[in-house]
Amino acid sequence: MREDKRKIIKYIIPITLLFSFMLFIFAPFEIYLSNKGYFFFPGWDMAAISCLLFVCSFIFITIILFGISIFGHKIYRLIVGCFFGGTLALYLQGNWDTTDYGAWNGSEIDWSVFRPQLFIFLIIFAILIFGCGLFSLIQHDRFIKISTIGSLFILAVLFITLSVLLVTKGGLSKDKEYICTTEEELALSSDRNMIILILDAFDSSAFKELIDGDKGEIYKEEFMDFTYYPDTVTGYSSTDMSIPQIITGKGYKNEKLFGEFLDEAYEESELINWLNENNWEKDIYADSLMPQGNSGQGICNSRLLARVASDKAELMYYMYTMVAFRYTPQPIKNHFYFYADNIKGNLNKVIGDYEAYTGNVLKFYNKIDDLSASKNGGVFQLIHIEGAHEPFTVTSDITETTETTYEEECIASLKITAKLISKLKESNLYDNTILIVMADHGYSNGRQNPLLLVKGLNEHHSFAVSDKAVSYYDLQDAYIELLDKHVVGEEIFGDSDDSKRGRLYCSVPFNTHLNFDTYGGLMREYVCNGYAWDQSNLKDTGNQYEEKESVNIR
């Protein structure tokens, strides 16, 4: 009997070892290493909890399966067989299912599109679980040999795969980088200021609907002195590429590593060079990659820092939720889907006496109360907040909830902007502040038509709507006109009245997350030869900037 017990434990161990190692060690670290550029924290932040869960899972399941053997060989053989079959099914689902569910950017997934995969994997799960269970019950000796060899073989494959990833991805450490901190946010000058407020994903058409609606006059009163440019085309459909283009005027085309592009773009930027030549302070508040060369050092709120996760337990909750999404069959995947940027938004912590900037809407709303005229000279601040980006969690009265609508988030973004305008007036900074309210990209109809509102120095007039055809590639000249020539209203953007002039726009895959040492995904270039809000005016130029490396969390 003692020998039987030893044999049972011996036969159980390879299967439970495979299950525990695959789900609690391999899966989270494979997701991390395969998408290392996306995650801000070092992999070591995951190590302690992953190892603990691995050991606990291995011991617990081994004891449970051994305990079942006490109640009879048949039920033991059936359950062990089903468990092995389920482990194989999870392995196939997590490592061989190539279905692309898109990026974890908060957008709703249309699960009906994936019905064929649903039936295929349900059949595979049923065949493996019940087939292995019956095989173990009927041919237990043969099952033991096959399951042992199979478990050890898959374990070896997983171990080798993880080892290769560790070597090729540079291990679990993350280098220090220049990071935008919250230092001096809204600390402005009594002399001259320029603020670019970026409301993420705020579509121009959404703003037009609001000013044409029942409360339109209220919005026009709040944005008195501003000129609205409804016929505006952004450069990119993604934040990571749009923000550098807004700041520098340079477009990324996969011609070099993204980090190299950032350094060169900031060095060649007309705006940055004008600010440097005129001794303006430069602050950038954006949860985006910053240049790491001299330009990065020249951004006043940028610090060379290492990031860590502020709460390791919550971090692993997110990581194992990703594991569950990846390894479970499709009928229950929707229970494990979340906005991946919540990891950075909730847990992003830098080592030292600084706070990393995250773009949180409610934090910025409260921060406006601290706006001050504590400096002299010129101050430039670009501030990017989450705005109207999915997931929709901010109501129109600026409170956080679990689910709201795009329109409510747009209204909340405008209320936040109105509060900023009011605070500038209260602090006697309104007239000497250039204020540009814009979006990095739109939301509907291909994302090409973002919000753009501009107010120059000492500009006073009723709310105005311009019919000029604007491209974000025009922004550099506009910045200099506003800063150096003090132009206002219709004088901005020169003679750009022809909406049929070609304005370039690049569509970027949603699953593109850039890092300094990566390239972007496949980008398709379009030219807009008509009104920006009409997607039918976007024509494919035939130019494609090939994908060299992209990341995705399936």
Image (tube, rainbow, N blue to C red):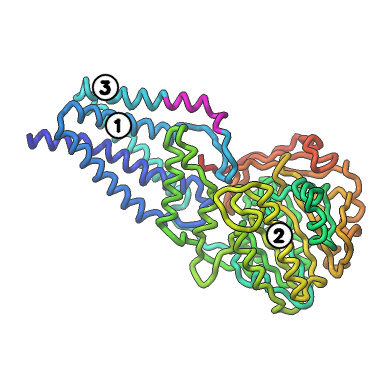
Q: CA distance from mark 2 to mark 1?
A: 56 Å
For discs 3 and 2, the disc positioned in front in the rendered view: 2
- Is the residue under label 2 in contact with that under label 3 (CB below 8 Å)? no
Query: From this viewpoint, which residue is outermost toward the left?
Result: 1
Identified at 66% across, 68% down, the residue is: 368
* Magenta extent: 111-122
Give the quadrant of residue 19: top left
Q: Which residue is mark 3?
A: 134
Query: From this viewpoint, which residue is outermost toward the front?
Result: 214
Classify 10 Å Cα crowding around label 1: few (below 14), some (14-19), many (20 and above).
many
Looking at the rendered structure, the secondary structure element under dot 2 is helix
Identified at 66% across, 54% down, the residue is: 396
Identified at 33% across, 27% down, the residue is: 129
Q: Which residue is mark 1?
A: 84
Looking at the rendered structure, the secondary structure element under dot 3 is helix
- Residue 353 shown in magenta: no
Between 263 and 135, the residue placed more toward the observer is 135
Q: Which residue is mark 2?
A: 415
Between 451 and 154, the residue placed more toward the observer is 451
